[in-house]
Image (tube, rainbow, N blue to C red):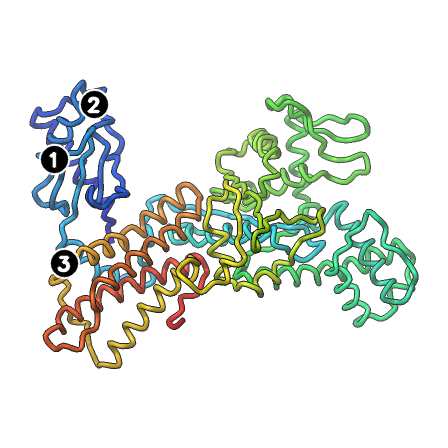
Amino acid sequence: MTRASEIVSRDLLKAFDSAIEKGDLPRTNISDAAIERPQNTDHGDFATSLPLKLASDMKMSPMVIAEILSRHLPKESIISASQVAPPGFLNLTLDPKWLFSQIHLIRNAKTAYGNLNLSKRKKIQIEYVSANPTGRLHVAHARGAVIGSALANLLKAAGHTVEEEYYLHDAGNQIEKFNKSLLVRYKQIAGLDIELPEDSYPGEDISDVAKTIWDEEGDRYLQLDESEAEISIGSKGIPKMIEGIKEDLESLRVQFDEWFSETSLYTQGQFETCMKSLNNKGLTTDRDGAKWLVSTKLGEEKDNVLIRTSGTPTYFASDIAYHFNKFHQRNFAEVIDVWGADHQGQIGRLRSALDALEIDSTKLKIILVQMVRFKKGETSEKLSKRKGNVIPLIDLVNEIGVDACRFLFLSRSNESQLEFDLDLAKQQSSENPVYYVQYGHARICSILRLAEERNIDFSNGDVSILGDPTELSLINKMLELPDVIETSVGNLEAHHLPHYSMELATAFHTFYQNCRVVSSEKCDLPISKARLLLVDAARLVLGRCLKLMNMTAPDKM
């Protein structure tokens, strides 16, 4: 199914070539037709700013260029009208008959509607969440989880092969700290009078794991010396915590294709291979008992420690080896990392290290996700472990529902801070965008049920008899979905999807308020059938949007 934007661009380029051929415009090169959807529909279905872009090179008035392009538009075109507008725009209106014909194409495409047919399809990995397996997930992890999973869906809709991955930091100092914390909690459950050291993980989730281990193993770990007990109970506790993390993610409808263990980098020799490669390029040095990456040779301001004096790798070193594995071992054409905004300072040095390893760092895309403030009543605050006011992720989902969580976390650009209104999320009114969009789908389903109850077979409806402006607006809005997917994938921005869903729901609600769909009058049967076809197409498109956001498409509310 060829997109409206593609056809309009093609017709404008034909007009441009025709005008040059006829000598009405001087020869010059252009890269695209510069079309967009006007915010004001009075300005047409599409508009092009091409005359404004050409005016300087052509030494002509943009208004004159626009008039010339208008005259040269192909006669066989989906554009039925064009209008020149100051200071040099050309507004374009689509042929209603062509618009009506798209209803059938949408219905035939079914749940594949909106998919892109890109010529360059890639093997892409997207890694997100990747919280340490030392505790259950909390609400601070939710936004990145939702954005990552929605982007994965959008990339798949664009035709790419996508693998979603969670990177398990199951090695290093944080695991030693977890093991010690778990053993202390275990001993407390056993009745020992022992305090949790200050430098420990105090979370209740660790106590829960310790209780489970006690129930399963009894006093087994009390029989071992301290060091052996820490390692042994940790090897039992980490898998249990990972199972808890998976449960948290599933509550948010997030599932990963791969859970990649940091430990495997060391046990399978990939970390060593990566470090040797850096060393052979003369980029490492031993200093103060530690191994350093000479980042200053790569244009960075300072060198960075790779292996501490204790012999344990730094996060930075394991990150280099991990990305070396992604590109060299697993051959991903593109890698997307979804990180918290507090990791921004790590981007430059990681890219420099990859370039040094002869990996094109432009193939690594990093999405930084800003913090969330939670609002309840008049109070708004940022939640953090340090403040001790964190909310377990699964508690948030249970309180407001997974659909509300997903939609609201997606509703703003990842680069913007988000205020999450907990009260609004639970409202069942048009003020709640989640309810508004889902109610649109439920209303559509109720209309189709009514048609079924009245035995109206609309499969042979004639859409050419449609013509109400709200019908045309709804069709036009439905035709935007492929472009929304393309923009979202091109910019790696998932927030366009909830915005578009709101606009589509508004277009449907406006149509519904202005056009009776199922009439009890026999004379209205033809228009009822035509509108039912339109409504069914709207069901598919709105349902597709909800599916891409991993939300439910309710048939009743």
Disc 2 on helix, strand or loop?
A: helix
In the image, is 367 to the left or to the right of 545?
right
Front residue of 337 and 542: 542
- The quadrant the N terminus occupies is bottom left
Instruction: Residue 500: give x, y in percent of width and height.
Output: 36, 51
Give the labeled residue for mark 1.
Answer: 70
Residue 71, position as x, y percentages in the image: 8, 34
- Which marked residue is nearer to the observer: mark 1 or mark 3? 3
Q: CA distance from mark 2 to mark 1?
A: 15 Å
Viewer-closest of 226 and 542? 542
**Amino acid residing under circle 2:** Ala
Q: How much space separates mark 1 and mark 3, taking CA atoms?
A: 25 Å
Say which quadrant the C terminus sits in. Answer: bottom left
**Which residue, given by chain and number where applicable, does mark 2 sit on?**
55
Viewer-side label of 2, 3: 3
Tag 1, which secondary structure? Answer: helix
Q: Which residue is mark 3?
A: 467
- Where on the picture, by quarter, is residue 36? top left
Which is nearer the eye, 273 or 550?
Answer: 550
Q: Amino acid at mark 1?
A: Ser
Assess whether mark 3 and mark 2 are in contact (beta carbons under 8 angstroms). Answer: no
Label 2: few (<14), some (14–19) or many (≥20) C-alpha neighbours in 10 Å: some
State which quadrant residue 516 falls in.
bottom left
Q: Earlier in the sequence, mark 2 or mark 1?
A: 2
What residue lies at 24% left-to-right and 32% top-to-bottom?
A: 49
First in sequence, mark 1 or 3: give its number.
Answer: 1
In the visual, does 22 lie left or right of 57? Answer: left
